[in-house]
Image (spheres, rainbow, N blue to C red):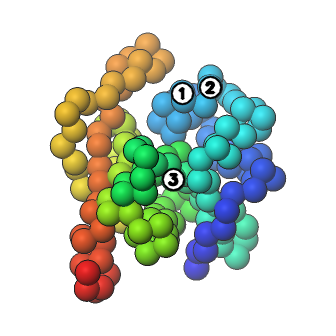
Amino acid sequence: MLRLRPYQGSDAGVVLSWCKDENSFYQWTAGVLGQYPITEKEFAAVESLMPFTALDASGPAGFFTLRRPGETNGELRFGFVIVAPEKRGKGYGREMLRLGLKLVFDVYGARRASLGVFENNPAARNCYQAAGFAAAPAEKTETYRVLGEDWKCLEMAIPASAWWARNGIME
């Protein structure tokens, strides 16, 4: 069973240890936090967002941030979503996102949640789909230059109405 709590700076070392190589680091951060490997001090930049740590009985099991892409809470955007390597493929990511979506819609009152995922990260895309996110049309596909390649970022979203319907809640 997972629970969320606000991120604490003391979580940084554990969260950063989950990214074992350059490729996975850039799939996770798109280089927004700096060049691989980053330090705990550089990772502190996430504190300007709404960061959360997912915990199970053994301690930190996942991490994500939320941010407002606009001026209101009408939409909240997930970022820097990561699950401890030993927990992957066991439903932890889906459960962590479910708890995050509950915050987005039931606590913050957003009407939509969104995120971006690189098309070269099918495991993450499958996790997001399992949590209820679907491909969302974007005016322009974002492309990042990473490790000498162009990586396309796919937009995914879930409206509050779909979240509530999925969970048997009447709007």
Quadrant position of the C terminus in the picture: bottom left
Q: Nearer the viewer, residue 85 or 4?
A: 4
* Label 3 sits on residue: 66
Q: Left or right of 160: which side holds 32? A: right
Q: Left or right of 33: which side holds 168? A: left
* Label 2 sits on residue: 34
Q: What's the residue at 41%, 68% (across, down)?
A: 109
Alpha carbon of mark 1 to alpha carbon of mark 3: how far?
Answer: 17 Å
Q: Is residue 82 visible?
A: no
* Label 3: which secondary element: strand
Q: What's the residue at 61%, 54% (across, down)?
A: 51
* Label 2: which secondary element: loop
Alpha carbon of mark 2 to alpha carbon of mark 1: how far?
Answer: 5 Å
Image depth: mark 1 or mark 3 in front: 3
Q: Is residue 107 visible?
A: yes
**Nearer-N-terminus badge (1/3):** 1
Q: Amino acid at mark 3?
A: Leu
Q: Residues within 10 Å of mark 2 (few under 14, many from 20)?
A: few
Q: Residues within 10 Å of mark 3 (few under 14, many from 20)?
A: many
* Label 1 sits on residue: 31
The spot of residue 151 in percent (x, y) is 35, 26
Q: Tags 1 and 3 in contact by the CB under 8 Å rule?
A: no
Q: What's the residue at 81%, 53% (across, down)?
A: 10
Q: Tags 2 and 1 in contact by the CB under 8 Å rule?
A: yes
Q: Residues within 10 Å of mark 1 (few under 14, many from 20)?
A: some
Q: Quadrant of residue 132?
A: bottom left
